[in-house]
Every structure is written in structure tokens, then in C-alpha cells.
Image (tube, rainbow, N blue to C red):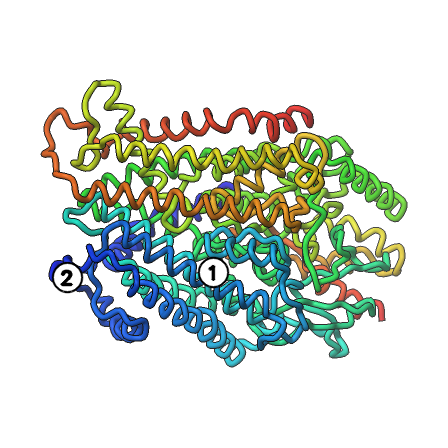
Amino acid sequence: MGILQILIVIAIVVLLVKPLGTYVYHVYSNDPNKTDKWFGWLERFIYRLIGLKNRPGMTWKRYAVSFLLTNIVLVALGYLILRLQKYLPFNPNGIENMEQTLSFNTIISFMTNTNLQHYSGETGLTYFSQMAVIMMMMFTSAATGFSVAIAFIRGITGKGATIGNFFEDFVKSHTRIFIPAAVVVTLVLVALQVPQTLDPVLTVKTLEGASQNIAIGPVASLESIKHLGTNGGGFFGANSAHPFENPTPLTNVIEILSMWLLPASLPYVYGRFAKNTKQGWVVFGAMMTLFVGFLSLIYFSELRGNPAMNVLGIDASQGSMEGKEVRFGIPQSSLFSAVTTAATTGTVNNMHDTLTPLGGLGTLAEMMLNVVFGGKGVGLVNMLMYAILGVFLCGLMVGRTPEFLGRKIEPREMKLIAIAILAHPFIILAPTAIAFLTDLGQGSITNPGSHGISQVLYEYTSSAANNGSGFEGLADNTPFWNLTTGLVMLLGRYISMIAMLAVAGSLVRKQWVPETIGTFRTDNGLFYGILIGTVLIIGALTFLPAIVLGPIAEHLKLG
Amino acid sequence: MNHTASNANCSEPSGKPIIFVALRASIVFIILCGILYPLAMTGLAQLFMPHQANGSLIKDASGNTVGSELIGQSFVDPKYFQSRVSSIEYKAEASGSNNYAPSNPDMLKRTQDSIAAWQKENPDVPISELPIALITNSGSGLDPHITPQSAEVQIPRISRLTGIPAGRLEQLVDKHTEGRDLGIFGEPRVNVLKLNIDLQTLLQ
């Protein structure tokens, strides 16, 4: 039953990739289509409100400036709201203003689609902040990521000088994808018992006569976009493990599908833009293969349980249940963990700090590679970066100028890609080392031994991959952690985005090279293997030493 | 579309218009996604599904609200079915757990204490039948459920303390055992609060 319920969810994803991908392609292809009738009026109204008279295609630089400026404005306004939330409406629980470094961390975290949370929603945010900052940024950061990914796809597949208009993509991401989907998912979740209210904390008298305060709020409207936008920041501290955020296995499946379907359909969208859907399926196949590998690692090691607990003489046949909910058990918890770290959502329905060492390794590795589906758009962009790298390596082996989708890959592109690929491990490993060298960093570790190394490594990996989940035992609401992870999130998000837009901008202007019999094909089984190989080799070369010190050492010690 | 017509514009180096569009777009989406959307959702939820939208509160036999069916409670009295371990003692103004790593000695100590306490209160049930789920901390600290097996192993104790025949208690547990969702997703489970509400009725 455990494996079957996992396979059913994977099958649903595979079946929906094509229809959903086709829809997404039509949204951004900018060719007239049926959906214009439903959403065109709203978009025209928004274009008028924001003063966008016509929507010319942009160069990559203009596109980058547009999305950066929009994000900077949102960060500034959001920061103000957090710092002044006490004085704003919808604060029935009397919550105070947020501290400076925590506000900095929170606002960067949500704008970069990371949703790392050093606060607890129950006590740290007013309902107004939950709505106007958190939910708003869950939409806008997802729309930003999606737009940049589409622009990148246009760049590497299109002809002409431009990669689209950022504001048009940004508006359409909201009107045609995120808002309609969020409305539907919110209402379904409410029907399945996720609360949606502006009432303050409830107080009840329990069956034994004690008093119990129950935090509540507009949970469902956050829950839907939290997953759809691969954001992951919970309304409550316990995130999707909290019964109000995720009351049943059915809501668990809905949340998994919500965060997984859009990233999974993007490779197909890329195939449509490239006018060769096989290109997309090769990328999808590589992602799914890696995913199934990591999922199996997590599932089987959680099912095997914690050796230290298994020897105590109790009935431990269910597996490692510390940090997990009874309604989800091992299968729904493992699947959720594998999807949330693959899609860089960062929502959790069980505590990753409590995972068995190899289970934790599975989640960590998916974020280190950062190409297994990936968050809103970013995963596909990273995977295509590895695809170009793979083509380049093969080109070196046979001594030909590498080509990708009919265009020559030259030093400028390879330099940009090298920067993006190397930035990721650098912003993980360098701060991890700094944290170990300082008392400020070491002082926050709460689990002794090798696991403490994993806690720190996980925190920065999650920040760099813009995932946002945590080994939450880490006492991370201190200025040191707020500022360092804030910077890592910023660099993790924007270095690769800007570098990849630059690659797109440079490719889009190149002459097409006609395909010949000597052209290295990127739409067949051989390339699928090369792609997986490139990802695993680069990943292993950069992260293996750190992994050995953390989860692998802990695993060997536990037996 | 006017892409071709206005390609000339794109080379304009001036960043000035962009900042105004960015500013206005930010304000529009703060209002649309941050205010209108959640308020509209709250309105619809309250109008059509008030029970779910307000936390699925649950009443006991005499009609008093005793909690939410989704939020676990701490049961101190051994006459009641016990919930799982919770480091926050089911205080639902917050949520979470200790985040003990599998190798953390504190977790081992807590589990050994739980086992010792179990042996004292349940001398009739060997610890080899004690399910791991019952003596581990859920992620939320608010888990409303225990596994069916975790309920069954508590029957001998409750029967001894209350005088209710074990067969009657087994019927009660069966009644409150929920299967997998749609017959396939998740795990079979027992809602402890609902089970104890019925048990309380029997006790009176």
C-alpha cells in the first residue's frame, strides 16, 4: 500500500504534464488563443493601472532591470509593513512589530521564493502581514521566477533580438496561472477542513477540563499559493505538519500535486518552445530518474527506522515515526519530503531534522543539485545550464564547437554558466565553514555530533537553493543567522537568474547553424544519460566531502 | 501583438519608465493578491463552509465545545486513551517539536522514560506490543491521531481502571478507526479526542 500510493501520485503527475504544459505554453507564446477571452479583459485593466501602454519585447538587460526593480520595490514595501505591523489592521492577537534583522531575513526569504522562516507564524505575524506580505510575495516571487524561466526558454529557442516583456509575463503569470489556481485550491482545502477566518486565537475547555488556546487564521488562502508557487512558508511554525494546514492524507496529496505539477510541466513547455517536444521529455526523464532515486533513498531509510530506537524492544515495525504525523505515516511523509526538496518548495509535513541520516541525505542532495524539477522555473533553467555544459563537455571530447538547439556555444556563454554553477556550492560551503569557525554559528547547533554539521549545512543549502525548509532544531533567529542566510538567499536567487538571462540574451542573437549528420543530438537516450551523468559528477565533486562529515558519518555511527 | 512594431523601443537605455511601471505594478499586486484575494476567500469560506472555515470545532455529549477535531489534546488521566508524546503538551497557541536527531541522546532518554512509564501503567501489555508511534513526538506536537494498534494496546489498562468490559472498548475503537483516504492514501488512524468523548459518555 505504501509504494502503491506513491506510484499513483507520480502517475497523476506524468499524465498531467502534457495538458498542463500545453496550457502554460499558450499562456506565454503570446499567440492569440482561447484563454484571451477569459482573462484578456482583466489583463488590459491591469496594464492600464500600471501604465504599461504597449508591451515591447525587451533585451535581456532590460528584462533583468525590470524584474529586479519590481522585486526591490516589493521588498521595500513589505519591509515597512513588517516593521509597522502592530499599527496596521487585522491584528486581533496583539502581535508586536518585527525586529530589524528578522524582518530583513523574512522579506528576503519571501521575495526570493525561499520562505526560510526564522519566526513562528502564530506569534510573529499579524493577519495583515500574513496576507499583504506573505501571501502577496508568494504570488509575486513565483510569478517572477516563472517569467524569468520563460524568458530564458525564449532566448535559447527563439529567433530575433528580444526575450519578451517582463511586465506582460509577470501579469499573465498571475491572471492566467496563479490566481485562478489558488482560488480553486483554497476552496477545495477549506472544504477539506483547512480554516479560513479572521477571528483571533480560539480558547476552549478540553475534555479533561483544562484550557487550550488554538491558533487559527486565514490559513487556506496561504496554503494554496504556498504550494502552487513552490514557496513553502507555513502559516504556523510546524508548517504542513500542522493539522490545520494539512488535515488529511487527501489534502496532503493535493498539496504535493500543487507544488509539483507546474515545475514538472515546464520541461514540456520548453519542448514546445523548441518545436521539438522530445527535447522536453529528455529533460523531464532525467529529472524524474533522479527524483525516483532520491525518493527511494528517503522512503526505505525511513521505513527501516532508527537503529537506536529499534533495539529498545518496542514494536518499531512502522519505521521512524519521530517528527512524523500518524495520518501520513512513512509513505506520505517520504513523498512529501522528496517533492518539497525537489521542487524547492520548503514546505514540510514532517520534521526534516528528525529524519534518519540517509533520509536527511536524500533531501539535502536534492537541494544541492537544485535541478530535480526545481522551484518556479529555476530548476528547469539550472537543468538546461547542465544540458549546455553536457554539450560542451561532449564537444571537447570530439573536438567540435559545441552546439545547442542550433546555436554555437562559445566562451561567453560557458563563462556565465561556470559562474552560475560555481556560485551555488560556494555560497553553501563558505558560510557553513564560517559558521563552524565562529561562536555565533556554533552556539545555535542543538543536536550533538555529526548531526550538528548536517544542521548547519542544511540551513545554507536550503537558503542557497531557495528552498526554505530547515533542520529546524537549529536556533536560527539570531542576527548572525538572519543576516548570513539572508545574503545567501539573495545571491542564490539573483546570480543564477541574471547569469542565465545573459546567456539567453547572447544566444538569441546568434546565427542558426543548420543541422547536419555530425550535429550532436540533445533529444535522445544518449543525451539523457549524459545529462544525468553531468549533474551527478559535478554534484559529487563539490559536495561529497561535506556530506561524508554530516549525514554519512551519523549513519555509520548509528549502525 | 506589437513586438515587431516596437522593437526599436527596447534599446532605449533610459530606466526611468521602468521604475514607475514597477512601482505601480507592485502596488496593484499588493492590493490584488495581498488584500482582495484573501478577503474574498475568507468571505466565501465563511458563507458556504463556516464549520470547516472556523476550525472544525467539536462538542461533547452535553453540547459543550471541547476542542477542534483536528487538534490533539493532552490526556493526563490514565482512564482516557492517551495521545502521542508532545514536547509542547498540545498547547496549540504554538506548534512544533524538539527536532531531535535520530542520534540525539536526549531522545533516547525520553523514549526509555516513556517505556518505563508504560510498563508501570500497563503491566498486562508487554513492551514488544507497544507501537513506536505512541511514544514518539509528532512533527506538529498537535497530532490528533494515534494508530489503531496504539489504541488497542491501551484497552486492558482502561478496562481495568474503569470496569468497562474490554469487548465494549474494542467496539469503540473500531467505530473510531478511520481507513485510508479514498481507500488508498495515508494511514489508518484513530482520532483520540472523538474516541475519548464517547468513552466519557460510557463513564457517566
Q: Is residue A203 above or below residue B75?
A: below
Dot 1 falls on which chain?
Answer: A
Which residue is denoted by mark 2 in the rendering? B6
- Tell me, yes or no, if residue A485 can be seen here: yes
In this view, B90 is above or below A400: below
Residue drawn where x is 57% and y is 55% of the image: A240
Image quarter where the N terminus of chain B lies is bottom left
Residue density around tag 2, few if under 14, some if 14–19, many if 20 or more, within 10 Å: some
Do marks 1 and 2 both belong to one polypeptide chain? no
Q: As rendered, which of A114 and B140 lies closer to the eye?
A: A114
Q: Nearer the viewer, residue B136 or A87?
A: A87
Rounded to the nearest angstrom, the CA distance separating label 1 from label 2 is 31 Å
Residue B6 position (above or below residue A331): below
* Quadrant for the C terminus of chain B in the image: bottom right
Locate residue A489, reporting x and y percent: 49, 47
Q: Amino acid at mark 2?
A: Ser
**Residue A316 visible within the image:** no
Secondary structure of residue under mark 2: loop
* Local crowd size for mark 1, using a 10 Å CA cut-off: few (<14), some (14–19), many (≥20): many
Q: Position of residue A466 (x, y in %)?
A: 48, 47
Residue located at (48% from left, 50% from top): A345
**On the image, numbered disc 1 is attached to which residue?**
A75
* Residue A371, image x, y percentages: 40, 39
Q: Secondary structure at mark 1?
A: helix
Amino acid at circle 1: Val
Q: Which disc, if any, is residue A320?
A: none
Instruction: Name the image quarter holding residue A36.
Output: bottom left
Residue drawn 38% across the image and 38% down it? A287
**Residue drawn where x is 41% and y is 56% of the image:** A142
Q: Is residue B113 left or right of residue B73?
A: right
**Residue B152 place in picture, x, y as percent:** 75, 51
